[in-house]
Amino acid sequence: MIHKLTGTRTILRISGVLAVVAIMATLSGCGLFQKMLTSMNIHPELAERGEKFPGSYKCGHCHIDIYKEWEGSTHSKSYTSDKFRIATNNYEYGFCIRCHAPKTIFTLLEKETVDNIDVPVTQAKNSEIAARDYNLKDGVDCQGCHLTVDCEFSGPHEGISPHPLKKDEEFYKSSELCGTCHVDTFEEYLTYVGNGNDETCQDCHMPAVRRKLIQDEPWQKLHKKKEGKKHTFSRLSAIEKNKDFVRLKFTEINNNNDQIAGNVEIINTKVNHSIPTGKYGYREVLLLINLKDNLGKIIKSKQESMFVELNTQIKPGEKKIYSFVFDLDDKSGELKELEAVLFRSNFNRTDKTLFAKVELQLGL
């Protein structure tokens, strides 16, 4: 009974403190409120380095929506996925772990110090990111992108929180954030951005959403809805936003009794990086050119693969032309259409993400 009363009193005391500081926040502004919460040190473990950090699930107690999105993303599985385990020969290649399970993307800059001037915080160079050896199942976790060297959580918004918070809107809305780990893709982006398309990585891979940053009680009552981004980090999000980012077109079709020949043109119209992009892992984009009968059955087919390693990827604004010739047989009278399909696939061709598709009816 004593324990129950003690717990109840603790809850009432915290609720009372929150009520008081909420009133003070209204009168004095959120800056004072934030300082008071920080000094109370309600959740010190969230900003702890190393094994003292309980894991991203604890962040999800307040940031419920963001945590659910992250949990379903490739970032949360960046270390535990079978693809990564196999590609690194059961985690033998430590170089890869720095970005698949980073301590944090932030590091100290070397500079001359003068009379206790704080050392500035900046994003790390790729070679400076340190791999962690704890909470590996979380992959790219909350601290990996948001914990600074000063043990503050950094993000694009200021707000009221039970942990130290630092606003850095410019960095978190720029592709430089993603480029800390996705170095090769970021270098491509820097080459092509500004040619009529200034969209950032976040614009395409983190869909816009207006909501409160936290949903837990009582904290959500102290927040207003803000413009933010979903933490999905998905190529599917990018495809949904730019459905015609790749254009397919049949050209120079020559149709006679013996064969059908022609070209398929592919143009990367809207993406500021190559398709596919990145230098690590198996990344293939596959073009299928199909000849189908009047029942929709494929009777002839040709395929073309595109890889960064072979320099056959589709660069921004680039047009690629693939020719095809299909010899006809006695069933030529049943031919109905040509079809071109472009998709990304894995090594076993079991995982397919559709990029574009075009069909051409044949008038035989």
Image (tube, grey):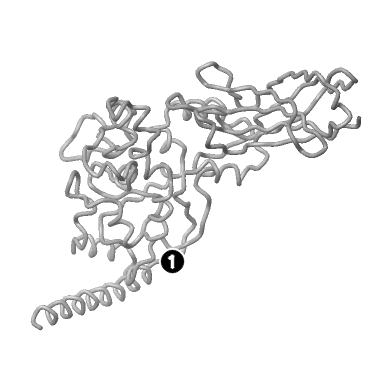
Circle 1: residue type? Lys
Task: Give the residue drawn at x 53%, y 52%.
Answer: 208
Task: Give the residue drawn at x 34%, y 32%.
Answer: 85
Task: Give the residue drawn at x 77%, y 35%.
Answer: 359
In the picture, measured across the screen, residue 341 lies left or right of residue 360, that is: left
The residue closer to the viewer here, 178 or 96, is 96
Q: Which residue is situated farthest in the left direction here?
A: 2
Q: Secondary structure at mark 1?
A: loop
x, y percent for residue 225: 46, 64
Which quadrant would the N terminus be assigned to in this image? Answer: bottom left
Q: Is residue 111 above or below residue 53?
A: above
Quadrant of the image occupied by residue 177: top left
x, y percent for residue 274: 56, 27
The residue closer to the viewer here, 138 or 23, is 138
Residue under label 1 = 224
Q: Residues within 10 Å of mark 1 (few under 14, many from 20)?
A: few
The total number of labels drawn is: 1
Which quadrant would the C terminus be assigned to in this image? Answer: top right
